[in-house]
Image: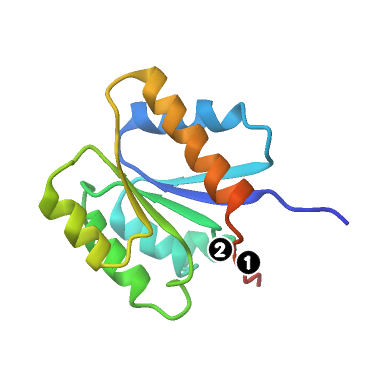
Amino acid sequence: MIVSPAEILLVEDNPADILLTEEVLEDSKLRLKLNVVRDGVEAITYLRREGEYANATKPDLILLDLNLPRKDGREVLKEIKGDDNLKSIPVVVLTTSDTDEDILKSYNLGANCYISKPLSLEEFTRIMKSIEDFWFSIVKLPQRNRR
C-alpha cells in the first residue's frame, strides 16, 4: 500500500517565513507536502478547490498567519470553521502576534492551537519540528476527502 504524503497548507505572505518553513520541513523524516498560498483570498480559493486550485488536495493541516493581505487570517479561520466541508481540518495559527486579544479571538473562532512565531532561527526550527511531530506522529487525523 502506497501512503501519500501528509498535506500541509501554509497561508503566509512573508517570503522569509515561507522559505524557513520549506527548509525545516524538507529535512523531515516524514513524507510531507507543503503547499503555499500568500493571502487570505487565495487560501479560501485553494480550500474550496476553485479556479486554478480545482485539483488541489484537501490539506491534513493548515498553518495560518493572522496578518495577511486581502483577507486577514481571522476572517479565513472564521470561514474555514464555518464551512462543513473544511471545519474538520486542524488549523494552527502561527503568527507574530502574541496579544491576548488575538489569542482569545483565534480560539473562539475555532483554532486548534496558537503559536507565536519566535525570533530566532533555532527556536523556529524547534517549533516547526514540534508541530510536525505532534500533528503527524501523535495525533490521529481524519482520512482526507479526495476527489
**Residue drawn 63% across and 66% down?**
144
Expressed as whole percent of the image width and height from the top left, the position of residue 117 reads 29, 34
Residue 144: which numbered mark, if any? 1
> Which image quarter holds the C terminus?
bottom right
Farthest residue in the bottom direction?
84
Apparent side of residue 5 relative to residue 87 in the rendered image (left or right) = right
Give the number of callouts.
Answer: 2
Apparent side of residue 115 relative to residue 37 in the rendered image (left or right) = left
**Residue drawn 62% across and 71% down?**
145
Labels 1 & 2 near each other (Cβ < 8 A): yes
Classify 147 as above or below 41: below
The label nearer to you, 1 versus 2, is 1
Residue 88: which numbered mark, if any? none
Q: What element carries label 2?
A: loop
Expressed as whole percent of the image width and height from the top left, the position of residue 119 reads 27, 23
Q: Distance of mark 1 from mark 2, alpha carbons?
A: 6 Å
Residue 58: which numbered mark, if any? 2
> Which image quarter holds the N terminus?
bottom right
Mark nearer the N terminus (1 vs 2) = 2
Q: Mark 2 is on which residue type?
A: Lys
- Rate crowding at label 1 as few (under 14), some (14 to 19) or many (20 or more) other CA atoms within 10 Å: few
Apparent side of residue 28 relative to residue 76 in the rendered image (left or right) = right
**Residue drawn 61% across and 44% down?**
33
Looking at this view, is 40 or 126 the one in front? 126
- Rate crowding at label 2 as few (under 14), some (14 to 19) or many (20 or more) other CA atoms within 10 Å: many
Q: What element carries label 1?
A: loop
Classify 110 as above or below 17: below
Q: Mark 1 is on which residue type?
A: Arg
Farthest residue in the right direction?
1
Expressed as whole percent of the image width and height from the top left, the position of residue 56 reads 56, 60
Classify 133 as above or below 46: above
